[in-house]
Each structure stands twice: as C-alpha cells, then as structure tokens.
C-alpha cells in the first residue's frame, strides 16, 4: 500500500477545527459538480444558495430566525452526544414543547397579560422535558435503547400535533383549515428589529449558548458528562452516577428543543399549524457534529445550516430548483465532516514509515 | 537432529511511529528445540512474534524456514507452513462453542468432517481434556488455553509459539503444560516460548534469546545461567530490591472486611463469598489468585463502584462504609488503583490535569460551588508528575500519550499524594517496565511505613512475597486466611489458588 | 358468517411486512458482523425512489428491483468506507446516511410525483391460486414476497451452517481475535454492510413498486427504524425477525380495518400504533439487561483498527 493510515500519538487539536472547514469546502465543490450534472450553472447556484439570502438586512434577520431553533436544540443535544446519550428525537420534543407553550396561548387567547409569554416559554421547556423523560425513564429503568425510543416518539408527537390541529384545537372561526386561532399580542415574542421577524428568541438562544459553554467548560457537571462519554468505566471509578447523567442530558436536550418549539410559534408563526418545524430537530444533529459538540461551534454551525434552509428557499424561487437540495447539502456536509474527522486521530503517510531510527537510539 | 534450523530470522527491523520495536533482530530455532524468547514488557517480543506468524510485516530482514528463505503473508500462510500460535490474550470467541472456535483457527479443509471427534482424539492424546460442544464463556482460563493448544496441535505444527502461557495458570497447571510441551519437543516439534519468568525458562527451555529495547542483547543456555544473571541481561543493570525499612506493623485496624458477600454484576463474573480480612496501619497485605476469581469484584466493592447491601461488611477506621459511593470513600481517605489504566483508572483522551481531577477533586478541593478550579487541578497534576518522576512534556498532554509505566506512576502518585489512610491497588505493576515497577513497589512500602494500610491484589507471586507482610489467596470468590509471608511457600499458595482447602494446603510440604 | 375480510386482511399484512422483512434480515447480517448501521431508513428510501424511477422509465419490474438494490448498496458503500476504513462513529454516520438519503430521494423524486406504475406482477397458477383462502395467500403473491421468505431462510442457513456465517459472527463477536487468527475484519464487515444495503434497497423498492405503487416524499415513514428495532426484538435471529415483521404488519393494518369497521378513534391515534408497539417491544426485550447483552454481538458498534 502506498498510502498508510497511522495513528497519531495524541489526537490533533488543530484538526478538530480544520476538519469542519475541509468538510464545508468539499461539500461546496461536490455541490457544484452536482449542479453541473443537473444542468444548472454551478457558480450562479452557489451564489443563490449562500450569498443572496444574506445580502439584505431582512435576509440576515431571517438567518438568525432560522438559526434560533437549530442553535437551541444543538446546544441541548451536544450534552447528550458528549455523554454517548443519543437523543435523536429532538423533533418530537420540539413538537410537544410547542404544543405545551402554544396550548397555553390558546387557553388564554382572550386574556392579554404580561406573564403569559414567560409562562409559555416555561411550559415549552417543560413539555420538551416531559417528552424526553420517556426515553430517559425507559433507558435508566429498562435499559431500552434511547435512539429508537426517542425517534419512535417523534412520530407519535407529530401525530399528536396532527390530531390537535385537525380536531380539538382547530380554529372554530376559521374556514375549516387545520390551524389554531391566532395568538394574542401578549403571547408573541417582541421583535428586535422593525420590519423583520428577528425576535427575542435569538437572544435566548445566545444566552443558552453562553450558559452551555460555561457548564461544559468550567462546571463539574460538564466534566462528568465528558468523562462518561469518553470512558464509562473511569466515570464509574470516579463515582459519577451514570443514570443521573442520562436523565440530566436527556432533560437538558428535551428542554432546549421544547423551548425552540415555543419560540418558533410565538416568534415566527403566531398560531399552531400542522408543520411547525421543517426538520430542525434532525438538522440540529448535523449542527452538533459540525460544531464539534461545543456550544460556540454549535452557534456557528447553526448559522451555516440556517443558511442552507434560506438557500434552498431562494434557489427554489429564483432558479426553480427543488427544495430538497437543502437535505442533500446537509447530508453531504455531515459525510464529509465524518470523513475529515479521521485526520484528528490518524494521519496519512506515503510509503514506508519515516520516523525510522531516531527514537530507538 | 539435522543442522538446518527450522526457523531462522536475520536482521529483522520494525518501526512504529516514534518507536523502534525491533532493531536488527536475529534468531535461530532448531527442530525439537524449546527456545525461550526472554525480555521485559515492551522489549519487542510480541512484535517479533507477530512478524513470524504473519500478522505484521517487518520493514527489513529475512526469514528462513527449513533453510529456505520465505515471506509469511498472513496467519493462514503461517499455519500452512506448520506454525501454530497460542496467544497471551486468547483469540477466542466467548459466545461460540469450542468446536466453532477451533474451526475458525484452522484451515477450511481441516475443519471439514468430524472435527469434534478429532478434537476429542487430540485432547485425549496429549492430556488436555476438552468438550467440543461447550461454550467458551463457561470455561475456566486454563481450559480456554487448552482450546488454543489443541487448535494448534490439530494442524501438526512444526513450530509452536507460546506467548506468556503461564501467566494465567496455577503452578500445578504450569507443570501439566510443561509435560505437554516436553512431549511435543520429543516428537521433534520446535517451541518458541515467550516469557519473562526466569525460573520457568530455566526449568523448560534448551536455549534462550534475550531482548531489551527492541534488540537482541544475548543468547544463552538457561541451564547454565542463574535466574539473577538472566534477569540482569534482561534489564541491563543489576536488580534493585525494594527496601522494606523498619515498619511497625500492628497499629490500629484501618480496613476491615466482615463476612463480605456480594453477587457479581458482570456476565460470567465471580460472586464474593464470605470474605474476612483486616489490614492494619503500616501493614501491606497481598492477595494472590488467578485472574477471574473475584479480584475485579473485590476491587469494585472496595472502591464503592458497587455497593454492598450490608454497610457493615466493609469498615474503614472502624466505621461502616459499604453503602458509600466512590466519592465518599475518597473523602474519608481511600486511595484506589484499578487494574486497567486506560479507560478505568484514567480517561485516555483527557489531559493529565483532568485525570487528576477525576479522583482528587473532592479531597484536594478542586471544585468550588460546582465550578472547576483549573489552577488548583493543574498544580496538583504538576506536583504528582514532579514527585513521581512521570516522564511527560506537560500536564496538558493526554493520558494515552504516556507509556504504561509512566501512566501507572501518575495514577499511583495521584492516589498517594491525597494522603490516603487506606490504599487498594489491583495489579499495580502489570505491564510496567522493571524500573517503574521497582519504584512503584517502593512507594507502596513507603506509604505503609507512613502509617497507611495497603492492600495489593496481584497475580505476580514474586511481587507479593517481596512487599507483603501477610498474604491471602482468593479463589472462586473466597479468601483464605491471611498469613505472614515468611510462613508461606509457593506450593501452598499454588494449591490455594487451585481451590484446595486451607488444611490440605497447609500439609503440602 | 362471512370470512370475506380474512383474505384481504392477510394479504395486507403480507404487503406491510415484506419491506420490513428485507430491511431487518439485511441489518441482522450487518449487526452480526459487529456493525450498527442506523442508515436503514435512508437506504430504504433511496431504494424506493431508484426502483420507482426505473420502473416508470423502463416498465420493467425486475430492472427496478435490481436498481433499488444497487441504490441501497451504493449508500451502504459510503457508510462502509466511512466507518470501516475511516473509523468514523457508526451512530453519527448512520444518521447522516438517513438524512442524506431522505434529501437525495426527494431531489430525485421531484420529477416523479404523480407518476404511476401498475405494480409488480403477481404469481398466478391456474387451479392453485383460486383455492379459497390458501390459494391467493400462498400462490398469488408477487416475486418479492417469495424472495423475502427465501432470503430469511438463506440468511438463517448461512449464519448458522456455513463457514462464511461463522466468519461473520466471529468478527462481530471479537474483532481483535478474528484479526489475530488472520481474517480480514474490514473485508468481512464491508461485505456484510453492502449486503445489508442491498436488502434495505429491495425493501424500499417493494414499498414504491408493490405496497403503494407511486412515489411520495418520505414514504418509508420510519420503517427503516422499525426494522432496526425488529433486529433487537428478534435477538439477531433471522426467523424471529421474520415473525416480528409480520406481527408489525398486523399492527399496521389494524388501523385500516378499524376505520373501515367504523371504530370511533381518530386516525392519528391508530397511526401511532406501530410506533408505540415498537417502543413497548423494545422495553420488553431489553428489560433483562444480562440476557439482552448475551444475545447481542459483543463488538456491535465498535470500530476496528489493526494496531500497527
């Protein structure tokens, strides 16, 4: 073999940060080839995808609006992923959280009082946590795989949403559309910049990023989470309680997803509709990996992923490209990232080993 | 005997990133010869053997078989030549039967037909009883080794490689194995016997090649050497025995186990059954035994990783601690050294200071209001590195970047510098170079001299005799009475390890 | 009393179970080799669109199934290269495969929404197929249904009776030992992954060619994940997986018949049944931790890298 894969003595710290950049570049190059094959001008497509959407103030505001749920969910999931707790049902937790917060808004649709919004946000967090508590309970009590249970519960949550908007929560004064009443003003998040949809939800996301960063980097809980993910036996040796950490990470990620769901409703949508999220809960998984399971990285990756959503919309409008290009982009990005990550622990060498004798003499 | 060597290696060199594992190694084995390959851990024995067996390629050098130069592409090719290998860490599949395991390790043609019948035949012929239908996970370690030996014998080997075969056997089982090996030698089979146990090599081998740091340093005839002279060739300088110094044994009881019983939490684990033991201040008690007889379970209940139902079954400083978890045990001054360094005692991909935080967080005040005091933790790790002479560029480097011996010094140092009243160490010098092993033993002795109670669980009898005041033996989850080391013999301990009752073992000599 | 409902009900169970059988039996082999491929959903959906596109353009059912298998295999190849050769995390890579598969299938399927395909031809043996009840069930299916049963039998035989099966189990049980004895862990795993991909692709093809012969975005609707749960439920035994799939097929059709019989439950709640049943089954099967671990391949989900 001419090229050999060789384990590095220590994981490379710089590669941790270089690898996402390599992945982004490879994704864009591959996407250009893909556009070429589809008979679309690759350069124009890339510009439409990545530059046009954010070339105006409103576009930038939309970027933050789309990034808000991704960043919130991403920070939450990063705790679990560090601890090898694979909650992939954030989409369901987002949905139930949105229903909890949105349900409160519907219950008080006639009363405008200042506490409504904070109560909704709390209800959203609680709803997401409650939905995530099911896989937590099943995992800690019955040793059931949380990947499959959290995902199955996502389908259940989406059906609950469908049932509610088609049935009991349907707007009685509407024209039989599967939609709820509109929320009143007290249930809506204040807008930050006039004429845009950018709202306080974005600030909450930034707050969660900061809190997540402090917890992960400086708090003993963050340390315990990292240890249990890297070496479960060492965690047990140190006396960290695995079940407690499973509960904690699932509740954190469920709570963040639930908050994101409520923010979607009371920030951008303003009522309960059959589709609350275009798959934010799944895209956030990519955000977490791209962001290196680090809250600040998640923030950047969340913005980039939000851009792929906007880019998909703008490509659909101006170039008549199918919206699904976004999903392909996202999947490819994660592939290239996982492939580039090999460079963190390994290096590639040509031909025979070059370290040769020096070490032995 | 002909003059053509069965196997001859000339100038074998193999490098890994940053390490030269084999440098210009030459070796010659005659037909029917039992040839010892002797060296410390890390001397390059395993690398050389992997090359012979076709698991790995060398960078340069040649290999000849019966006088013809050859290359062995893979283990299948090695087996076709007539090379059989018994691995130190058995290459067995727990969830499969003996027969399936053997079928996997021989050529497909050989595996056809009545394999079970031939297994019974060979095992009867060489006195290696084995039931082809049993699942491996139900077998003892000794029986598992037999699978590997029978697997080799089925292929009529011309050369049998045995990698540290006796480390898992009782002294009596070792005798049985030696009978089989001598018989094979009489049938003209060559044996490459890898070990660092000198007495065994003197008893068994016709010739020896001694390696140190990847190079051959000597060839000798074991019968003409003393264990000490071979040890000195192996280590490169004269042996330093630890100084036991003047210790006053007989202080207060620091650690006490009272009728300690607990079910194993592991699949195929061993339950602990009515263990009684007292360790006093200033005393070192050694626990001997073959791996898998409850050592792991004992460590888990002593560390608090597994809680026992009866809090009073474990007492430290005369207080019941059986229901306290690891953090609380450390607070009251328990130091713990698990067997596995990477992954249990330390997190491989974390830095040394973080690995210090892992066990010293509470006792050394590294956490305030839940927040990590990075400065305190870093300083502590630096102190450990300095006092225990851990070779590392700095405490921000990962645990996995350290050599086995250096990491073990760090782990033991991390515990000792917390000034524990009781320390429990499982296999403290396993896989550690002789220099580090000697310094680790000395540290344990010094700790006891300072008034701590030290409990060492080890498979290495020489080590236990060297440092222990009293020795007990664990077998199938039961512990024999701890007796002063000077009153015990290797034979007695061997019988206890094999499960013979204490009365019978006492009459053994 | 009329038994009119029985035959259609059984036929619907068979159609609902068959895609699960393909995906689950393929994943069984993959997991037996020690690899956890969570991308079954992605491989199924890519198989579904590839097969449907081929069927619409060529009209050939056989060619469509082959293309579906090839598409699943191609995705599995990406997974294999990443996890086996580049040592990427199996969980993350499997998720990526699913996200990618769903996106790519939607992109390809863009032009196929609303197109139709007559469905796969059914076996029709004069005299046999017309036997009441037994006839249409045993002798009136399309080729893929028979293939699904045959593949279960074949895989069961392969895993327990052949040397190849022994090797697959060996690398899943202890990859270090398999390597030191001299087997190529990477090659064996790669082969198992590719087989699993092709089977998932055929399962997807069945969805778009026979189950509902048209293309709907996201039409797998979590069946890939249910197949993964089935493998656990079946304790990695092919025949148990087969019966599990039929059990789930039965649950899936309850909703159709309950609605037909005028049961007063919202459609959404009935649609939840397969997902809730999966959760319940997983709880039952994994409750006994020691037993669950005994059946699982010991190296499941762990990457192998030959040191040196």
Image (spheres, coloured by chain):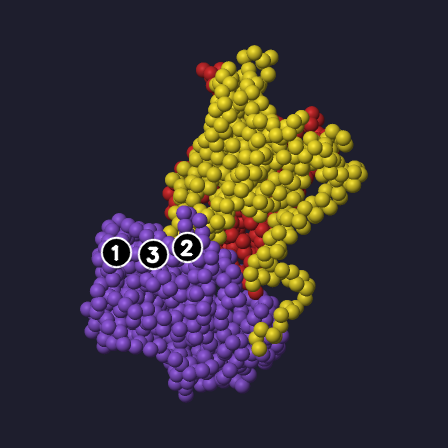
* Quadrant of the image containing the C terminus of chain B: bottom left
Residue B330 marker: 3
Q: Can the viewer see residue B328 in this picture?
A: yes
Q: Which residue is label 2 attached to?
A: B366
Chain B takes which shade in the image? purple
**Chain letter belonging to callout 1:** B
**Chain letter belonging to callout 3:** B
Q: CA distance from mark 2 to mark 3?
A: 14 Å
Q: Residues within 10 Å of mark 1 (few under 14, many from 20)?
A: many
**Decide: marks 2, 1 in contact (CB < 8 A)?**
no
Residue C18 marker: none
Q: Secondary structure at mark 1?
A: strand
Picture residue at 57% right of the left edge, 75% below the top:
A360
Mark 2 vs 3, N-terminal side: 3
Quick check: B334 left or right of C99?
left
Quick check: C99 left or right of B467?
right
Q: Secondary structure at mark 2?
A: loop
Q: CA distance from mark 2 to mark 1?
A: 28 Å
Q: Which chain does the red colour mark?
A: C
Residue B273 percent location from the top left of the image: 25, 57
């Amino acid at each position: 073999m001419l090229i050999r894969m060789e384990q590095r003595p220590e994981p490379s710290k710089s590669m941790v940060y270089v690898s996402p950049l390599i992945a982004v570049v490879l994704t864009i190059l591959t996407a250009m080839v893909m556009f070429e094959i589809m008979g679309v001008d690759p350069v124009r497509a890339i510009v439409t995808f990545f530059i046009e959407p954010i070339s105006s103030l409103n576009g930038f505001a939309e970027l933050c609006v789309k990034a808000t749920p991704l960043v919130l969910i991403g920070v939450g999931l990063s705790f679990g992923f560090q601890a090898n707790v694979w909650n992939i049902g954030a989409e369901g937790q987002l949905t139930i959280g949105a229903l909890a917060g949105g349900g409160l808004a519907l219950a008080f649709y006639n009363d405008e009082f200042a506490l409504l919004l904070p109560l909704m946000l709390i209800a959203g967090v609680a709803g997401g946590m409650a939905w995530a508590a099911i896989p937590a309970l099943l995992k800690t009590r019955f040793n059931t795989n949380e990947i499959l249970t959290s995902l199955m519960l996502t389908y259940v949550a989406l059906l609950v949403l469908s049932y509610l908007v088609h049935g009991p929560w349907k707007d009685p004064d509407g024209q039989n559309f599967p939609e709820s009443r509109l929320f009143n003003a007290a249930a809506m998040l204040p807008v930050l910049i006039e004429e845009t949809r950018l709202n306080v939800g974005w600030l909450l996301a930034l707050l969660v990023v900061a809190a997540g960063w402090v917890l992960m980097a400086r708090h003993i809980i963050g340390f315990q989470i990292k240890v249990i993910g890297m070496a479960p036996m060492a965690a047990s040796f140190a006396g960290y309680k695995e079940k407690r950490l499973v509960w904690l990470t699932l509740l954190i990620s469920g709570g963040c997803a639930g908050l994101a769901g409520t923010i979607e409703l009371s920030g951008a949508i303003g009522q309960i509709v059959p589709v609350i999220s275009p798959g934010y809960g799944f895209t956030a998984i990519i955000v977490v990996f791209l962001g290196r399971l680090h809250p600040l990285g998640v923030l950047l990756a969340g913005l980039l992923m939000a851009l792929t959503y906007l880019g998909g919309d703008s490509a659909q409008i101006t170039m008549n490209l199918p919206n699904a290009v976004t999903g392909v982009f996202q999947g490819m990005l994660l592939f290239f990232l996982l492939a580039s990550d090999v460079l963190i622990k390994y290096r590639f060498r040509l031909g025979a080993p070059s370290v040769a004798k020096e070490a032995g003499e | 005997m002909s003059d053509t060597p069965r196997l001859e290696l000339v100038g074998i060199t193999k490098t890994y990133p940053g390490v030269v594992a084999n440098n210009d190694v030459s070796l010659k084995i005659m037909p029917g010869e039992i040839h010892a390959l002797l060296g410390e851990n890390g001397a390059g024995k395993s690398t050389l053997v992997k090359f012979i067996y076709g698991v790995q390629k060398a960078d340069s050098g040649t290999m000849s078989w019966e006088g013809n130069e050859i290359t062995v592409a893979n283990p299948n090719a090695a087996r076709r030549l007539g090379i059989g290998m018994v691995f130190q860490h058995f290459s067995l599949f727990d969830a499969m039967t003996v027969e399936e395991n053997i079928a996997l390790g021989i050529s497909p043609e050989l595996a056809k037909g009545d394999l079970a019948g031939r297994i019974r035949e060979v095992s009867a012929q060489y006195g290696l009883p084995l039931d082809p239908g049993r699942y491996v996970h139900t077998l003892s370690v000794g029986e598992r080794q037999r699978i590997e030996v029978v697997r080799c014998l089925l292929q009529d080997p011309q050369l049998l490689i045995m990698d540290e075969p006796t480390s898992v056997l009782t002294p009596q089982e070792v005798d049985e194995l030696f009978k089989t090996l001598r018989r094979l030698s009489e049938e003209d089979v060559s044996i490459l016997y890898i070990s660092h146990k000198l007495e065994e090599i003197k008893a068994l081998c016709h010739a020896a090649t001694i390696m140190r740091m990847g190079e051959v340093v000597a060839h000798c005839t074991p019968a003409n050497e003393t264990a000490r002279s071979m040890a000195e060739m192996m280590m490169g300088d004269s042996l330093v025995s630890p100084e036991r110094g003047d210790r006053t044994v007989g202080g207060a009881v620091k650690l006490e186990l009272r009728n300690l019983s607990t079910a194993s939490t592991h699949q195929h684990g061993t339950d602990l059954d009515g263990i009684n033991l007292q360790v006093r201040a200033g005393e070192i008690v050694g626990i001997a035994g073959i791996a898998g007889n409850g050592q792991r379970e004992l460590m888990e209940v002593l560390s608090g990783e597994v809680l026992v139902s009866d809090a009073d079954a474990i007492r430290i400083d005369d207080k019941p601690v059986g229901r306290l978890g690891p953090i609380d045990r450390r607070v009251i001054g328990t130091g713990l050294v698990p067997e596995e360094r990477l992954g249990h005692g330390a997190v491989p991909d974390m830095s040394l200071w973080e690995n210090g935080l892992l066990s010293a967080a509470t006792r050394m005040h590294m956490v305030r209001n839940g927040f990590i005091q990075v400065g305190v933790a870093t300083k502590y790790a630096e102190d450990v590195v300095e006092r225990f002479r851990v070779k590392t560029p700095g405490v921000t480097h990962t645990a996995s970047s350290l050599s086995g011996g250096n990491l073990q010094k760090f782990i033991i140092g991390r515990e000792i510098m917390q000034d524990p009243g009781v320390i429990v160490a499982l296999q403290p010098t396993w896989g550690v170079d002789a220099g580090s092993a000697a310094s680790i033993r000395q540290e344990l002795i010094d700790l006891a001299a300072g008034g701590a109670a030290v409990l060492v669980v080890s498979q290495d009898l020489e080590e236990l005799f060297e440092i222990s005041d009293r020795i007990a033996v664990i077998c199938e989850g039961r512990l024999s009475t701890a007796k002063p080391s000077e009153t015990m013999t290797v034979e007695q301990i061997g019988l206890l390890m094999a499960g013979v009752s204490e009365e019978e073992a006492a009459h053994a000599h | 009393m009329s038994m009119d409902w029985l035959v259609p009900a059984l036929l619907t169970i068979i159609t609902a179970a068959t895609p699960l059988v393909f995906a689950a039996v393929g994943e069984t082999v993959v997991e037996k080799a020690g690899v956890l491929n969570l991308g079954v959903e992605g491989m199924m959906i890519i198989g579904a669109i590839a097969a449907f596109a081929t069927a619409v353009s060529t009209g050939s059912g056989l060619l469509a199934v082959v293309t579906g298998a090839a598409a699943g295999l191609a995705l599995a190849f990406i997974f294999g290269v990443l996890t086996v050769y580049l040592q990427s995390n199996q969980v993350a890579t499997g998720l990526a495969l699913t996200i990618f598969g769903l996106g790519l299938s939607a992109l390809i399927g863009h032009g196929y929404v609303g197109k139709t395909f007559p469905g796969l031809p059914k076996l029709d043996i004069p005299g046999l197929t017309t036997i009441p009840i037994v006839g249409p069930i045993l002798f009136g299916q399309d080729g893929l249904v028979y293939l699904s049963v045959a593949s279960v039998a074949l895989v069961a035989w392969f895993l327990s009776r052949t040397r190849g099966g022994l090797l697959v189990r060996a690398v899943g049980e202890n990859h270090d030992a398999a390597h030191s004895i001299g087997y190529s862990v990477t090659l064996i795993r790669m082969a198992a992954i590719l087989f699993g991909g092709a089977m998932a692709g055929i399962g997807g093809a069945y969805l778009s060619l026979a189950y509902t012969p048209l293309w709907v975005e996201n039409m797998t609707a979590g069946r890939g994940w249910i197949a993964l749960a089935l493998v656990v439920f079946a304790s990695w035994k092919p025949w148990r997986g087969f019966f599990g799939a039929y059990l789930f097929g039965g649950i899936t059709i309850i909703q159709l018949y309950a609605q037909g019989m005028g049961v007063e439950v919202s459609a959404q709640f009935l649609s939840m049944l397969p997902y809730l049943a999966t959760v319940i089954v997983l709880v039952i099967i994994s409750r006994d931790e020691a037993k669950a671990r005994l059946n699982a391949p010991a190296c499941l989900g762990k990457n192998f890298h030959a040191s040196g």
